[in-house]
Image (cartoon, rainbow, N blue to C red):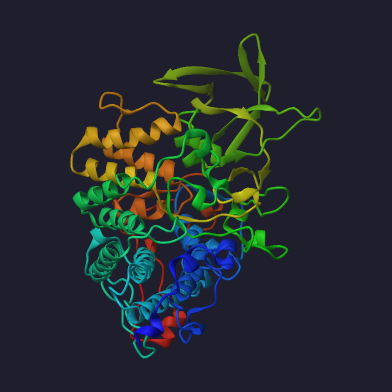
Amino acid sequence: MKKLYRLLPLVALFITSCELERNPYDQIAVDDLLSDPGSIQTATVGNYALLKGNDGYDGWVDDLHRISEYAGDNVSLSGGTTDALFNLYNYQAIPTNYRVARFWSNSYKIAVGTNKMIELIPEGASEEEDQLLGENYYLRALVYFQMGNVFGKPYNQGGSNLSVPLKLTSATDDRPDRNTVEEVYNQVISDLLKAEALMNINRGASYASKEAAQALLSRVYLYKGDNILAQEYADKVINSGEYSLLGTSTFKTMNTLRPDDNAEAIFAVTLSSESDLLADGDDWWTIGSLYASIDGIGWGEMYASSSYLNLINQHPSDARKAFISPQLLEDENGDEIPSIYWVNSSYTYEFRSITEANGNITFSEDGTTYTVESEVDGDNTKYYFVGGNGKQYVNLGYDMEKRNGYPKFYILKASLQEDDVHMWSPMVSRLAEMYLNKAEAYAKQGADQMALDAINILRVRAEVPEYTLANLPAGKTVLDVVLDERRLELAYEGHRRYDVYRNGDTMNRRYPGTHLNGTNAYLEIEASNPRIIEYIPEQQIILQPSLIQND
């Protein structure tokens, strides 16, 4: 039997496969491989393939991103849609949401695939086999961790709350009921510790590694509130020597890099222009397509929120603004149109064209001329005019293209990999997150200066002023600025929804967007609101009535 599971030589498996050069996950499914001697590595790759889906836009990671990001406060949808993503965005959850159901189904496909490999691969037979065994433990942990985030409440709301069923075998008659939040966290941590111990070959950011397990452990411990271990595991990755932060200029084009060309990528779900999004029209169904229309390709209907823009615009030089692309209007001469804009008390945008003459900025409305003044606030210059309602702060810029009155602040973080319009390899872990995990863990332990030291590493890269204990923004604590930095750095990478609620904060969505439409709009969502998690898919309840539905 041992001969049945013997791997092919390492060089042949890890380097020379033509298929792996096209895309590391393009192999046949797990069920078709188990009769093939030496198929364990290929079967493991099949489990990775389920992360991205058949076409590069219908897999596990696509639905996870939409579930995680659209319910945050970094995005603003400019219209309605019949797609189930609208229910994710506006908190009008339904138990028949096909995207949530597909995420559930794909999660268990991956879990069963990894279970098969864990059952088949003999531990200790060789370093290569241990590596593959560890990768399967990592993938199972990743799936259950993210399922727990989607369907189970944050750890700090009680470990006895229900989370997701932990299916740990490949047996078809094994249909467990929902486990608790505590049990899911314990299993995830157990799997990751096992993965960390087994993996000693780093095959690049397209595959799990010892450092990928350590990076995810850092996040899991942070979510759990075990700050000492969150910091310890972040440092393991930082000090491994395997990764380095991109320089500022390269960071600004990070979205164009394949994961294996990104020095700070620890693990990403890799898509490739050679093997993904090959059919005509595929780009239209990607994550990036909703965020931007590039060369006429893409819907371009979900934009950076005014809430996020207000934060990042505090420092006009912030390198992270490179991932936001305002679509500017031009006049008949092809020139941009100087304007001011602001969000009014009804949470709608207002734009006014301005005239600059003799050092003054003015605009006219209803026969009255208003002068735009400026004031210095720390390192920033603020602009305002005084109207009938007093001082109105404004943004100084240019008029913009709009959709239904919403200015098009395109998001580019999920597009342009390899200069392919909407190609993107969603990042699971990168080095910057380790500094943020470490900073948050320090801040929660009262080690304020060490927390600031950690985020200042990223602020230097972003070309914004470093924080000291003496120059924190008015009314902000060290933890506040650490969480703001996390929001700035990890925007559009699927973190924000969980970062808000696991810290017991309220999601403030008092900004323009179609989430405000209707009679049951959610302007603020407290961490105690039952809608911070999704319903168990209705079809699963029908198939397994013993599953208890979320409130």
Please tell me which residue lies in front, 16 or 160: 16
Report whether residue 526 is seen: no
Q: Position of residue 99 (x, y in %)?
A: 52, 69
Please tell me which residue lies in front, 424 or 405: 424
Compared with 275, 442 (above or below) is above
Q: Quadrant of the C terminus?
A: bottom left
In the rendered structure, the answer to whether residue 296 lies left or right of residue 471 reads right
Q: Position of residue 337 (x, y in %)?
A: 70, 28
Please tell me which residue lies in front, 177 or 44: 44
Instruction: Residue at 46% x, 78% y: name it.
Output: 39
The residue lying furthest to the right in this view is 332
Instruction: Residue at 31% x, 83% y: name it.
Output: 176
Q: Position of residue 448 (x, y in %)?
A: 22, 35
Q: Position of residue 459 (x, y in %)?
A: 39, 33
* The quarter of the displayed image where residue 338 is located: top right
* The quarter of the displayed image where residue 173 is located: bottom left
Report whether residue 70 is seen: yes
In the rendered structure, the answer to whether residue 26 lies left or right of residue 531 reads right
Q: Quadrant of the N terminus?
A: bottom left
The residue lying furthest to the bottom in this view is 173
Q: How many marks?
A: 0
* The quarter of the displayed image where residue 204 is located: bottom left
